[in-house]
Amino acid sequence: MKLLIPGPVELDSEVLLAMAKPVMGHRTPDFEEILAECWRLLKYVYQTRNDVAIITGSGTSAMEAAVASVIKEGDEVVSITGGKFGERLGEIAAAFGAKVRKVEVEWGRTFAIEEVEKAIAESNATAITLTHNETSTGVVHDARAVGRLAREYDLLFIADCITSVGGDEVKTDEWGIDLCITGSQKCLAAPPGLGFVAVSERAWEAIESNAEKRAYYLDLAKYRKSLAKRTTPFTPSVTLIYGLHAALKKIEEETLEARIRRHHTLAEATRKAAEAMNLELFAERRCASNTVTAIKIPPGLSDDDVRGALKREHGILVAGGQAQLKGRIFRIGHMGNVRFGDLAQVLSALELVLQKAGHELEPGAGVAAAEEVFSREG
Amino acid sequence: MKLLIPGPVELDSEVLLAMAKPVMGHRTPDFEEILAECWRLLKYVYQTRNDVAIITGSGTSAMEAAVASVIKEGDEVVSITGGKFGERLGEIAAAFGAKVRKVEVEWGRTFAIEEVEKAIAESNATAITLTHNETSTGVVHDARAVGRLAREYDLLFIADCITSVGGDEVKTDEWGIDLCITGSQKCLAAPPGLGFVAVSERAWEAIESNAEKRAYYLDLAKYRKSLAKRTTPFTPSVTLIYGLHAALKKIEEETLEARIRRHHTLAEATRKAAEAMNLELFAERRCASNTVTAIKIPPGLSDDDVRGALKREHGILVAGGQAQLKGRIFRIGHMGNVRFGDLAQVLSALELVLQKAGHELEPGAGVAAAEEVFSREG
């Protein structure tokens, strides 16, 4: 099955085979060397000088670590929503006792910065949360603008960059992201099961002085203590670290700059192709994601006509809609190792299944539109 | 490097290679089939009919999930300590706001059940915690006896069985363990990075009715909801699940009964060998662990004379002492895939390094003592 879902993504065979290496003791100099390399390369993809905590767990575990480490009962938190994952960050803050003030954004659109500022000004918030690239809707929000407000109002800026780091521009330090969260199985093209948080100096201060923390495994203070000793606080998943290391080396080889450009080209090619196939994009153009594209299922067609047929007839897995978007959209993940050839393959298959289901389109038009983008930008 | 540490353990090549298989979509019937097989086999090793939550994270994440899901601010918890991991369970309960009443046990010994009962009777505890096999001291405690008290006093019984499930007898249902925790990288001989909690019906009730839960990723209620749909609440580590599946199939092949017998034989052989080498065991004999043996470093010798030399000269990694036992003991992990041949190898190397360091022993006596146990029981 060919994966074009927004994670987990397909892995390079070097990465897969790295995980078949014998397990090392996790408190040995040999393993610490691999960890040190991972930290160096994570800072590179994060564009940060901050320390990066490596957590064994899925992306959500890193979200919980970020929130639980700085938030305490009764704190106010401004939470920008607009999709399943933006909402999740707010839910996690609420689960840890925060009073959450939501800035609700229509799904598929982005926020007006004035509304964010209004919410901050009207609250006593100590932190603000944002999901930078909202995988559920295919929207990328302006994290830089939120970072500016966070500095102005002296808030901790917690950003879920799970589907942007390593695929789209994330300037952790320049944008002032205090707790920058990502996961292994998305744009980094590493195996699922590792979460990361890049932590700024002011966030470390908040963490260290948080006496009422409700966390242990997910207490970032423990990760900082271990970082100083070049290790992790709990037994890490040794084989996943092997895989991560191999994946990060691939990114260094490609260079982050070229990788981000590749993702941008794939996204633009997907959008142009969709339009050329008479399909409607779900997200507004000005905030369309560069790592995942959400496309409306045409009127009269079902999820099975599109996704089911792609899977059955072409062995291609794309994602469906989540929550209220179930059955209304499908999502093509073009992140990680996806190359133009992979995209051409899914676009061509898509033309075939759409035609078969009675959707009107000019055969080849989608692929041609993508080719045009590729030959101009790729 | 040959690993004889108490986890992570060496993996079978079938398990290693399973992790090199291409990543599947985690919401597909093919992957759900593998998950279902894992659940079936986990119930087998746990000797339970309870549901088992599979958490991407290290063993400590499963400890935190168990505690955070049932404990709320102000709850009283009786916590039996006596080693690093027993203490950790108490620390986690305290981190989540519990009033922890410790039953302190001297390291290397086990509890007097009367003292446990006294602590329960004098408190308003709603839960009791125990680390069944205390890896830091090489002690196995009587979990069955604690289970009986937990039933009598209507307490939730939270047991860390991280280094016993799959290697020593753990009768989850018969002993009345409500939240039975284990990890992948110990006796199960699966890759590190997965934690498990087998949850009883009464524990599910406590979880569902816990309105003040401070957890999201580690909220077991989410795992129950997903279990009903044969899936996991968050993206699982697909490659680790492949490895787990392969490892559990190996256990089924060997049978749990034979596996536990093998661990018992290895433990007895290690103890007899140590004594024959004029070494002193750290744990009392009547409560000596069947998966890890703690041995005192002989007077006049250093940790480096023993562990350092084993590593440098023989490529064998055994564990050192933790916390106050640093430099005072070393620990041989004989769990997971360790066979008699592996043990013979480490014992022989141990004889060599001890002699070299000036420790008096009769060459071959340790190995001979182990052979005797093996030929009688193996």
Image (cartoon, coloured by chain):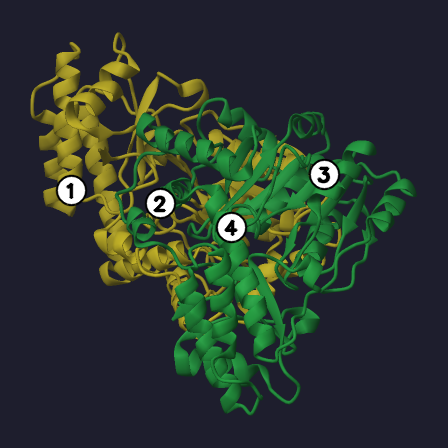
Chain colours: A green, B yellow
C-alpha separation, residue under disc 4 versus residue under disc 2 = 30 Å
Whether labels 2 and 3 share one chain: yes
C-alpha separation, residue under disc 1 versus residue under disc 2 = 26 Å
Q: Position of residue B309 (x, y in %)?
A: 20, 19
Helix, strand or loop under label 4: helix
Q: Is residue B77 visible?
A: no
Q: Chain of mark 1?
A: B
Whether labels 4 and 2 share one chain: yes
Residue wearing tag 3: A157
User: Which of labels 4 and 2 is toward the front?
Assistant: 4
> Which quarter of the figure has residue B282?
top left
Residue wearing tag 4: A261
User: Which of labels 1 and 2 is toward the front?
Assistant: 2
Q: Is residue B135 visible?
A: yes
Residue wearing tag 2: A239
C-alpha separation, residue under disc 4 versus residue under disc 1 = 56 Å
Q: Is residue B185 left or right of residue B26?
A: left
Whether labels 3 and 1 share one chain: no
